[in-house]
Image: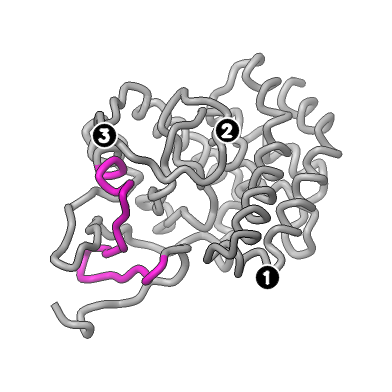
Amino acid sequence: MTSHDELPLAGGNVSGGVVRVSDTVRRPAGPWTPAVHALLTHLHAAGFTAAPRPLGIDDRGHEVLTYAPGDVVWPDRFALLDPEERLARVGRTIRAFHDAVRDFTPPPDARWRTLVPADGTEIIAHHDLAPWNLVTDGDGPWAFIDWDTAAPGTRLGDLAYAAHGFVPLTDRPGLRRTDADAARRLRVLVDAYGLDEPERRRLVPLLARRAQAMHDFLRTRAARGEQPWARMWSEGHGDVWRADAEYTERRAADWERALLDG
């Protein structure tokens, strides 16, 4: 394989970059890679296909995954999620993942790349279910990518993080929706996922808490000079997460009404 065979892929906070080679993706591997590959193998065996299939390690020590055709939703194709049926599809896809992973038993020597402290160890969660990790091919196959931060977590924590990006829960110019629109879209996502009433009540405070955890994570890693987090902090990502957390917390009563009424 020569460098001419490689097509750099944009996005992803991976040192050394990610490339496409034919119908595969090559990414730098880490201590967590064997556990992640075991997880992805289990998901496909359980019938969940909205994720890459692991193909091993190449001769340069890079993990090899199947290539997911299509384009990443974020940022240029976010409007694809405006039809609420497609937002509902996000909720159903996340639920299918969580159902498939419930009976996954990690390898005894599993090592996970835990970045943000989890709120529990109910499942092996993705921890970055967001538009920047969703590849779509129109109404064809969808896939969540970038599973390298999969680690113990909870279904509600994973869903709360997803709600931040997919609703989205923000008042930033260019992304902001009316509060009523945001509340309605949150209801669409959660209805499609299928939470019962007690779970809906528990989800609401997690929405702001999960965004605040991302701010705190970036602040801590930037203070240590760790990349790419220090760069992201300097670019203002920490301020964005803090503002989104504050907005989401201010509107908590709206989210609860939207999820519980009707």
Dot 3 amino acid type: Asp
Type of colouring: one colour
Q: Which mark is residue 235?
A: 1
Q: Which mark is residue 85?
A: none
Residue picked out by circle 2? 157
Q: CA distance from mark 1 to mark 2?
A: 26 Å
Dot 2 amino acid type: Gly
123 relative to 241, above or below: above
The x, y position of residue 205, in whole percent, is 73, 29
Residue picked out by circle 3? 109
Left or right, residue 117 beside residue 21: right
236 relative to 91, above or below: below
Q: Earlier in the sequence, mark 2 or mark 3?
A: 3
Q: Nearer the viewer, mark 1 or mark 2?
A: 1
Q: Secondary structure at mark 3?
A: loop
Q: Earlier in the sequence, mark 1 or mark 2?
A: 2
The x, y position of residue 13, in whole percent, is 47, 63
Left or right, residue 229 beside residue 123: right
Q: Secondary structure at mark 2?
A: helix
The residue at 31%/63% (across/down) is 28
Residue 143, magenta (yes or no): no
175 relative to 169, above or below: below
Q: Quadrant of residue 183?
A: top right
